[in-house]
Image (cartoon, rainbow, N blue to C red):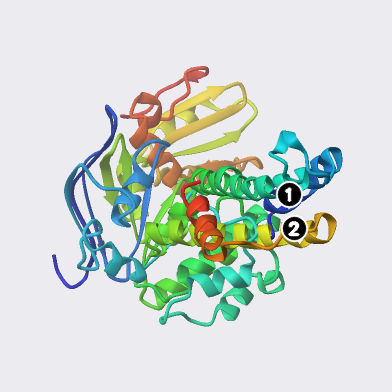
Amino acid sequence: MTERDVVTVRGLRKTYGTRVVVDGLDLDVRAGEIVGLVGANGAGKTTTVECIQGLRKPDAGALSVLGYDPVTQAEQLRPLVGSQLQDSALPDRLRVSEALALFATSRARDGGELLERFGLAGRRRSVFSSLSGGERQRLFLVLALLNSPRLVILDELTQGLDPAGRRNVWAAVRQLHEDGTTVLLVTHEMDEAEALCGRIVVMGAGRVLDAGTPAELVDRHARWATVRFSLPDPPAPLLGQLRQLNGVRGVERAGARVTVHGDRRIIAHVGATLVLWGSVPDDLSVHVPNLDDALLSLLEPGPAAEAPVPASSELIGGRR
Amino acid sequence: MRDPLVLTFVFAFPIVTMLMIGGAFGTAPDPAFDGVNPAHWYVASYLTVVIAATGLVMLPVHLASYRERGVLRRFAAAGFPRWSFAIAELIIGLVTVIVACGLLLIVAVPVYGIPALHDWWRVAAALPLGAVPS
C-alpha cells in the first residue's frame, strides 16, 4: 500500500448464510479519484462498501481504508469518511438543523452553506418525515460532506432526484474531486458513472468483472456502432460498397430501411459514402456504443451483446 | 415529545383511563380494595401503565422502526457507537416515565386527593428500578 492508496481491499469475502455475496474481491481506490462501483442488483456492491465502512464484518480478506482497518479501527476511521447510504433514514421527528448539529464534529464546515448549496436552506426547521425523497437524498449528501471527509462513499447518490437535482449533485461531486476528496460511488446509472467517474469497477456475482476508464470499458465491451437510414429502392451497388467499408460487420435491408453495423469508424464512412452517391437521407440515425452497452455486454455476455445484428430482417452481407 | 404515539400511549392514555376507571369505582373506601379508596388504588396502578407504555410500546416501536429503516446504520456510519443509541433511548425512556408520572399525579391530586408518601426514598428507588427492566 502506498501513501496514495485510500482504499485497498484484497480477497474480500462475505456470505449471508449459504449465499456468497462478495467472493474474493480486490479493489484499489487512490487519493483524489472518483471510482464508480457498478453492477447488476445483488452483485455485492453495497455489501462491499459496508465492509469498507466497517458496518459489516468480512468473512475473509484484508481491508485498509486511509491506513485503518475498518473492523478493528472503526472509531478512528469513521470521522474521516462521509457516507450517503442506500436505504437509510433519520428519526422522523428530527429537524434538519438538529441533524446538522448532531452529526457535526470539530472538523465540521459551515452547514448553512451546504444547505444553501443543495437547496435546503428553507427547510432548516422541517422534520425529516416531511422532506420529499429528493430532499432526503440531498440532506444525506449534506451530512456526508459536513465534516470535510477525506473519503466520501455515495451509494445510489441520485436515487429519487429530478434531473435538475441530479445535475446539482453531480456538480457538487465534481467540486469535491477538484478539492482533492476521494469518492467511491455506487450506482446503477451509467450516465452518472460516465459523467463523474475517472475509473469504473464492474462487479458481477461478488467479483470484479473488469475495471478501467469509461472509454476503456466501452472500447473493450461495446465497440459496435449502428447506422440506420431509409432510401427508396436502395441500389445494390451502394449496398455492396457499404459492405466493403472499413469496420463494417454487416449490412441489413428491410424494405427501404438500411442498417449498417460495425465499429465506430463506420459512422464517418457511411455518411461520406452516402454523400458521394448523392443520396442523403433525412432520417439517418446513429447509435454510438456507451457504458450501458458495455455493462450489458459484461453482465450478459452472448451473441446479442457481442454483435448487434437483428435476426428479423434480411442480412445481406458484411465482413467479420 | 414530538411523536404522536408517545403523546397518546404514554401521556394521554394512562390519565384518561385513570379518570374513567376512577369515576366508575368512586372514592369511598371499599372492602374489595382492602379497605382502600379505589381511586387511590387505580392511581398507583396507572403509574405502572405509564412504565409499561414506555417500555413495551414506545421504546420497542422506536428501536424496531429505527433498525428497519436504516436509522441505526446511518448513525453507526457517522461514527456514533452502537451502545450510545441504546443509552440515549434508555435515558429518554426514564425521563419520559418521570414526566408522565408527574403529569398523572398532577391530574390525580386535585381529583382524588392523593395521600402523602410515607417512604419517599423507596418510591424514588422503585420507580426507576421498575422502569429500567421494562
Compared across the picture, whether B130 is left or right of A318 comes to: right
In the rendered image, which quarter is residue A31 located in?
bottom left
Residues tagged 2 and 1 counted as in contact (Cβ below 8 A): yes
Q: Give amino acid for label 2.
A: Ile
Q: CA distance from mark 2 to mark 1?
A: 7 Å
For label 1, the SS is helix
Chain letter of disc 1? B
The image quadrant that residue A15 belongs to is top left
Looking at the rendered structure, the kind of residue marked 1 is His
In this picture, is A302 found above or below A88? above
Rendered view: B82 above or below A238 = below
| Label annotation for residue B114 | 2
Query: Which of these two is toward me, A145 or A283?
Result: A145
Classify residue B24 by image quadrant: top right
Residues marked 2 and 1, same chain: yes
Q: Is residue A164 above or below residue A274?
A: below
Task: Give residue B62's position: percent from left, percent from top.
Answer: 56, 49
Q: Residue at x 78, y 60 (%)?
A: B109
Dot 1 crowding, Cα within 10 Å, few <14, some 14–19, many 20+: many
Q: Nearer the viewer, residue A81 or B60?
A: B60
What is the x, y in percent for residue A75?
Answer: 30, 66
Q: Where, quadrant-wise, is the N terminus of chain A in this rendering?
A: bottom left
Q: Is residue A197 left or right of residue A23?
A: right
Rendered residue at 41%/82% (across/down): A106
Q: Chain of mark 2?
A: B
Q: Which mark is residue B40?
A: 1
Residue B98 can be seen, yes or no = yes
Residue at the left extreme? A1
